[in-house]
Image (tube, rainbow, N blue to C red):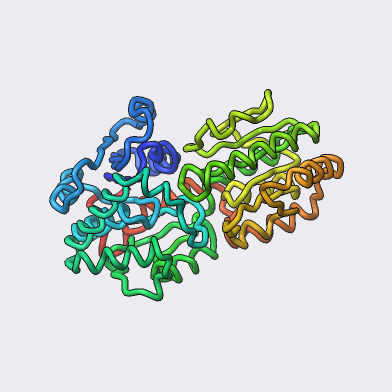
């Protein structure tokens, strides 16, 4: 069987696609994998060194109907897996569907309420914006609709922020055949926002929970607080000055509390944002520490923190809406510039310790969004990718 993955950024290949690989190979020893990507954002040699045998890495360099269709045909895919509902993802999905290749979207994170991006994002990413426009035009050619009409629909959805149900949109042509989601809530979300039916969606649990049992058995890191970073600045959702102001306040508050700071970075974190943190701060893109206190905004990893502690402090930035499925987990919410109260809350949490009753309540609350009853979310997703279409009319050319 040949499974193709598309990720917008090359660095993304090292996350979900490679995380799924052990489960895929365990259930399909003869698997061949093709990794398509759109943006070169990291060291390609590092990525190649991690790729499994019988795999290919392909950059989409020419955005045209002919090029994309020929790429997919040449690789003789039995499945195409995308990680989101972005314009490039939908373009590849529409191309695959036109070739009768089964398509799967694997939820790769959280969706937040529509948010206006910083103007600087569009200025610094004009090339990216132009490439997205080309993908939209190619999609229109593939599904045989007016190019200007489809571009207008994308503008209304992704820039103006109109919900799917309020606009005309060719969902059947650009939506994946199947969606793998974290929990029940996301089935409703994909139906409401993208037009998927409940039958098209399957719950596989959240990949961040893959090591939850091991995490719960670990010893607590004493006198320590963990800040869970997000790419708010990197993605153009927050002015750099606002993040730097918060980091300064965090640094001072941690120093006043006498606690040690650990930072769980995002894979795309701009490390220069954290230059002013206290000496001895531990930064990691992979390790998730078991701490007494967690600080964050609205990352999916905050749901993982609920299994360790009830002391979850959420930080508010102006015009940023923290979704209910994260805000409901908060012990306290603070403004980004309230240094005095942040220091006070850190001391209070360290002194009072963890309330296991509240931990249990929070775990129960988040299960609707991140189903923790699934023992191995990545293996569950891998099996779905391999087996979903075996008994359908789509079928695969060969089965595992």
**Residue 365, percent from left and from top:** 67, 61
**Which residue does the image show at 30% across and 40% down from the upper left?**
35
**Which residue does the image show at 48% across and 46% down from the upper left?**
378
Is residue 253 placed above or below 117 in the rendered structure?
A: above
- Front in this rendered view, residue 118 or 47: 118
Quadrant position of residue 282: top right
- Front in this rendered view, residue 235 or 84: 235
Counting labels gives 0
390 lies left or right of 15: left
In which quadrant will I find the N terminus? top left
295 lies left or right of 140: right
Quadrant position of residue 348: top right
- Front in this rendered view, residue 360 or 43: 43
325 lies left or right of 164: right
Is residue 46 placed above or below 181 in the rendered structure?
A: above
Residue 216 in view: yes
**Residue 223, percent from left and from top:** 78, 33
**Which residue does the image show at 51% across and 54% down from the upper left?**
110
**Residue 18, percent from left and from top:** 41, 38
Quadrant position of residue 344: top right
Is residue 70 placed above or below 55 in the rendered structure?
A: below
């Amino acid at each position: 069987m040949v499974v193709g993955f598309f990720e917008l950024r090359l660095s993304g290949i090292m996350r979900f696609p490679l995380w799924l690989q052990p489960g895929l190979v365990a259930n399909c020893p003869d698997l061949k994998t093709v990794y398509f990507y759109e943006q070169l954002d990291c060291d390609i040699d590092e990525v190649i060194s991690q790729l499994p045998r019988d795999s290919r890495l392909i950059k989409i360099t020419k955005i045209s109907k002919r090029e994309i269709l020929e790429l997919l045909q040449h690789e003789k895919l039995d499945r195409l897996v995308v990680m989101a509902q972005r314009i490039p993802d939908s373009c590849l999905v529409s191309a695959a569907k036109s070739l009768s290749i089964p398509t799967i979207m694997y939820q790769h994170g959280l969706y937040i309420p529509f948010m206006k991006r910083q103007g600087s994002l569009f200025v610094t990413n004009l090339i990216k914006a132009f490439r997205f426009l080309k993908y939209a035009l190619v999609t229109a050619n593939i599904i045989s609709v007016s190019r200007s009409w489809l571009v207008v629909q994308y503008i209304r959805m992704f820039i103006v922020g109109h919900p799917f149900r309020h606009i005309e949109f060719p969902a059947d042509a650009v939506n994946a055949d199947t969606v793998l989601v974290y929990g029940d809530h996301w089935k409703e979300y994909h139906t409401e926002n993208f037009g998927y039916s409940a039958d098209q969606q399957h719950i596989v649990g959240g990949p961040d929970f893959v090591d939850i049992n091991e995490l719960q058995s670990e010893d607590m890191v004493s006198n320590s607080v963990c800040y869970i970073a997000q790419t708010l600045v990197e993605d153009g959702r927050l002015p750099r000055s606002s993040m730097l102001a918060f980091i300064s306040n965090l640094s001072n508050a941690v120093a006043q509390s006498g606690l040690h700071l650990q930072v769980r970075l995002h894979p795309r974190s701009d490390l220069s944002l954290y230059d002013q943190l206290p000496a001895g701060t531990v930064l990691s893109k992979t390790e998730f520490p078991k701490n007494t206190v967690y600080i964050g905004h609205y990352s999916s990893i905050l749901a993982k923190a609920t299994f360790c502690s009830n002391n979850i402090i959420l930080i508010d930035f102006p015009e940023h809406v923290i979704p209910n499925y994260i805000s409901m987990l908060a012990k306290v919410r603070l403004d980004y510039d309230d240094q005095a109260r942040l220091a006070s809350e850190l001391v209070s949490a360290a002194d009072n310790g963890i309330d296991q009753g509240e931990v249990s309540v929070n775990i129960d609350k988040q299960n609707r969004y991140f189903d923790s009853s699934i023992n191995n979310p990545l293996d569950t997703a891998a099996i779905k990718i391999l087996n979903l279409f075996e008994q359908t009319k789509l079928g695969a050319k060969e089965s595992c």
